[in-house]
Amino acid sequence: MFDVSYEHFTSRKHTGNVFGGMLALMKRIEAIIKPARLDELQDRLRRAGAQGITVSEVRGFGRTGGKRDAYLGLAHIADFNPKVRIQMMIDDDMVQPIVEAIQAAACTGETGDGKIFVSHVVDAIRIRTGEHGHDAL
């Protein structure tokens, strides 16, 4: 159907989307953090230039496999810890300040501070107007 190589999506030399338009490079930032750090993170992200974020309450565990708790004198392991997931789409040149803001706000130095994931975005489309790429952000 489409004769498109993987390099079409990842090459810095060609930033066109699959529809043929020219787009600025965009990234998706996703971070999983402790809920208590959300307010400070929101402030830091605004100061770093983030124009919008999506926040979801999630639960999960990492390498430690959950936390040990005592309930009615009995020890048990809570399988899932409450976390907050932050997602945002940004221009490529904003990655460094956004990642630094997340690290500064979310770091407590304790186990379970979270993770940050950065990935490429091929296209973004604003539903209301049909704008593509940077204009849709």
Image: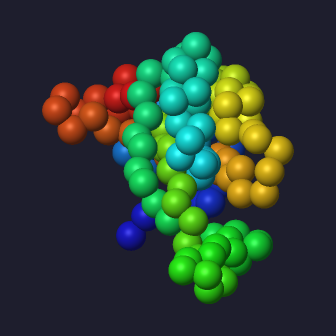
x, y percentage for residue 8? 60, 50
x, y percentage for residue 93? 66, 23
Q: Residue shown at 68%/52% (left/top)?
A: 114
x, y percentage for residue 56? 41, 50
Q: Residue shown at 56%/77% (left/top)?
A: 71
Which residue in the rendered view is the most extreme toward the front? 73
Tell me the quarter of the image containing the C terminus. Answer: top left
12, 72: nearer the viewer: 72
Q: How is the image coloured?
A: rainbow
Q: What is the total number of numbered labels drawn onto the structure image?
A: 0
Tell me the quarter of the image containing the N terminus. Answer: bottom left
Which picture quadrant has residue 92?
Answer: top right
Compared to residue 68, the image places residue 29 above or below, namely: above
Q: Is residue 102 visible?
A: yes
x, y percentage for residue 32? 59, 52
57, 133: nearer the viewer: 57
32, 117: nearer the viewer: 32
Compared across the picture, whether 137 is left or right of 67 comes to left
Which residue in the rendered view is the most extreme toward the left? 128
Which picture quadrant has residue 63?
Answer: bottom right
Compared to residue 7, the image places residue 43 above or below, namely: above
Compared to residue 78, the image places residue 24 above or below, namely: above
Compared across the picture, whether 55 is left or right of 67 comes to left
Q: Residue shown at 62%/86% (left/top)?
A: 74
14, 75: nearer the viewer: 75
Q: Is residue 123 visible?
A: no
Q: Residue shown at 74%/30% (left/top)?
A: 104
